[in-house]
Image (spheres, rainbow, N blue to C red):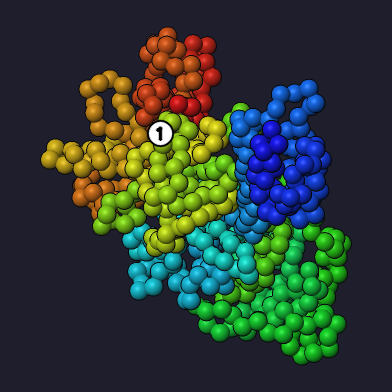
């Protein structure tokens, strides 16, 4: 009995850190006294000994118990190993949480929304310039040129000088990793913009200083507000004749019911625009130009009461600045960040992206005030923390043929929680399919770099093996689903066809363009007409589809316009459609999920059908959500 007890004590002593006693001292000592001696010595040498002491208390043998056996010795060793493993797991968990918290805190994510020609792509280029991602900005022009915007990668974008696709761009600025989602400015691609906003934590609304609030700005603002995003406002093109700053602020409040907080204020406009008054530091910042494609040189900062300003600024502009600053004080001293994050106020910045005026100051203030990646809410109402140990991501965009040589398909994924690692296995929540993410990429327009890891807020490109669809959740832990991304009612409808000899590449083209949401596809319900119907928001979508069919798939397509302008889904299903019977001036078709869709010639036709058969059809929907499975 004494020998077995001695062997057990020596084993425990070794597990606790080595030399805690000698065989001589242990021999002849009562069992309980040996236990306590070992624990006291362990406490002196290892701060974890209290856990061992608790274990020893459990191993003490009462006076009436049987002698200690070799099985008891094995159990004690296992218990000590369990303590050691638990300690290692605890340290690992603490390090993981610390790493996730640190990485998430240094990330910012935003999308830019604007009316066409407000300077969105130019602002994107200049932000990349200050982030060190590029060294020379290619200003967008609506003509062919040797230099093009970095974010415009498609040949049609380069030739027409417009942004057609959403682009994910990543750069680092002063230790902060910024994920910038460049969206199409053209209203024909507003659905693509909406999908992109589903992956954004913030929105930057770009306004043309000469034109103020424009139609597309209104539409995209409504989408951003629907997503409850913090909205920053950048008043661009102050180097051209512009509206009065207070008039623009008044427009924002009247149009959107959104109070404004001017973070800085312009000094002059047009060719007299010479700088800004930056309220956070109460300094006048004057600018010098060093070239449109490089960083502007910022001059010295001056106190507002510095006498030299009267020599540097034209007298009438300086007097106007003093009056404006006095009025600004009425609006309050500091920006209420809580009100910003809840969408109750928008900070306003003035500048000229083309000439780099005010761009870097905007970037600095944005990083300070913008929302960090936060919790996401699933369809069941459960919050997913960005620092969760389980990885989850949202597929918000699919893009085919970014590299035409390889006919690739890329899925853009917003990391929602946890840590993304190259080569990890994830489950597609919709289908249950397990996919290995062996070739993750960070996208920079159509250029790519391999990604080893990512955290909440990052946007990562994944090679799509046909397993992903827009709105999919990728998970490593429990299965979950994020709120679905809706499909909105199109306004133009055309039947598309091709030569019989091109049917095979034609089908592949339709599948590829449909998968990435470039256009909606509907099918006839009569069984005799096999040519699909392309449904679009604007004519430019058709031009892009035909261009891509030709360039990427070698298919010459023909469009036949249909006389319909409104689409409505029938949530009640096919039974309701059959019960309604024949409907005049209405075409019954089905979407890619086989659900009934009614096409109407005009609003009058829609009202007539609702009056005649509304009770049988039930409520019609102007949008549709993808099925849950």
Left or right of 461, for residue 358: right
Taking the spot 62% from the left edge, 74% from the top edge, the residue there is 357
Quadrant the N terminus occupies: top right
Q: How many marks?
A: 1
Of residues 427 and 224, the one drawn nearer to the viewer in this rendering: 427
Task: Residue 348: name its quadrant.
Answer: bottom right
Left or right of 139, for residue 274: right
Q: Dot 1 corresponds to which residue? A: 433
Of residues 368 and 111, the one drawn nearer to the viewer in this rendering: 368
Q: Residues within 10 Å of mark 1 (few under 14, many from 20)?
A: few
Picture coordinates of residue 454, whole percent (x, y):
53, 54
Q: Relative to 240, does residue 455 appear above or below in the rendering? A: above
Picture coordinates of residue 231, whole percent (x, y):
66, 53
Q: Relative to 287, does residue 120 appear above or below in the rendering? A: above
Taking the spot 34% from the left edge, 48% from the top edge, the residue there is 409
Q: Residue furthest top?
A: 579
Task: Residue 247: name its quadrant.
Answer: bottom right
Left or right of 306, for residue 412: left
């Amino acid at each position: 009995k004494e020998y077995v007890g001695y062997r057990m004590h020596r084993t425990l002593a070794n597990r606790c850190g080595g030399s805690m006693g000698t065989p001589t001292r242990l021999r002849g000592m009562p069992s309980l006294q040996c236990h306590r001696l070992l624990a006291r010595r362990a406490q002196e040498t290892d701060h974890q000994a209290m856990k061992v002491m608790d274990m020893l208390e459990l191993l003490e043998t009462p006076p009436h118990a049987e002698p200690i056996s070799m099985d008891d010795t094995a159990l004690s060793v296992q218990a000590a190993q369990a303590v050691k493993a638990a300690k290692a797991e605890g340290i690992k968990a603490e390090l993981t949480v610390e790493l996730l918290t640190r990485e998430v805190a240094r990330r910012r994510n935003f999308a830019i929304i604007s009316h066409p020609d407000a300077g969105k792509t130019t602002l994107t280029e200049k932000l990349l310039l200050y982030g060190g991602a590029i060294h020379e900005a290619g200003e967008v022009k609506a003509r062919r040129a040797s230099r093009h915007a970095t974010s415009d990668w498609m040949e049609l974008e380069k030739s027409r000088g417009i942004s057609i696709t959403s682009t994910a761009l990543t750069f680092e600025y002063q230790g902060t990793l910024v994920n910038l989602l460049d969206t199409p400015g053209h209203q024909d691609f507003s659905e693509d913009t909406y999908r992109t906003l589903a992956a954004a934590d913030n929105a930057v609304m770009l306004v043309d200083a000469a034109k103020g609030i424009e139609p597309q700005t209104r539409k995209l603002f409504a989408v951003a507000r629907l997503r409850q995003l913090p909205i920053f406002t950048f008043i661009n093109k102050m180097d051209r004749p512009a509206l009065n700053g207070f008039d623009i602020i008044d427009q924002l409040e009247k149009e959107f019911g959104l109070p404004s907080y001017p973070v800085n204020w312009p000094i002059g406009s047009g060719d007299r625009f010479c700088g800004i008054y930056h309220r956070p530091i109460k300094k006048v910042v004057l600018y010098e130009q060093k070239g449109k494609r490089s960083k502007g040189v910022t001059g010295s900062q001056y106190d507002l009461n510095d006498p030299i300003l009267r020599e540097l600024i034209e007298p009438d502009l300086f007097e106007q600045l003093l009056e404006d600053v006095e009025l600004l004080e009425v609006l309050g001293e500091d920006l209420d960040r809580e009100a910003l994050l809840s969408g109750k106020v928008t900070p306003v910045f003035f500048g000229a992206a083309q000439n780099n005026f005010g761009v870097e100051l905007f970037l600095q203030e944005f990083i300070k005030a913008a929302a960090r990646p936060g919790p996401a809410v699933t369809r069941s109402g459960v919050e997913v923390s960005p620092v969760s140990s389980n990885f989850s991501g949202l597929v918000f965009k699919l893009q085919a043929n970014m590299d035409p040589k390889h006919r690739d398909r890329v899925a853009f994924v917003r990391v929602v929680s946890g840590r993304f690692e190259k080569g990890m296995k994830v489950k597609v929540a919709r289908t249950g399919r397990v996919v290995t993410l062996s070739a993750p990429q960070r996208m920079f327009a159509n250029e790519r770099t391999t990604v080893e890891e990512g955290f909440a807020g990052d946007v990562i490109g994944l090679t799509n093996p046909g397993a992903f669809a827009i709105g999919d959740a990728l998970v490593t832990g429990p299965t979950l689903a994020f709120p679905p991304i809706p499909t909105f009612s199109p306004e133009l409808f055309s039947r598309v066809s091709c030569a019989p000899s091109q049917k095979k590449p034609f089908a592949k083209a339709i599948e590829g363009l449909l998968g990435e949401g470039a256009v909606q596809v509907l099918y006839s319900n009569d069984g005799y007409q096999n040519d699909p119907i392309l449904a679009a928001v604007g004519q430019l979508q058709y031009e892009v589809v035909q261009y891509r069919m030709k360039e990427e798939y070698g298919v010459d397509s023909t469009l036949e316009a249909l006389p319909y302008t409104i689409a409505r889904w029938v949530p009640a299903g096919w039974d309701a459609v059959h019960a309604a019977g024949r409907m005049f001036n209405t075409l019954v078709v089905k979407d890619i999920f086989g659900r009934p869709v009614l096409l109407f010639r005009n609003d009058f036709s829609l009202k007539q059908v609702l009056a005649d058969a509304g009770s049988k059809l039930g409520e019609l929907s102007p949008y549709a959500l993808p099925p849950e499975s």
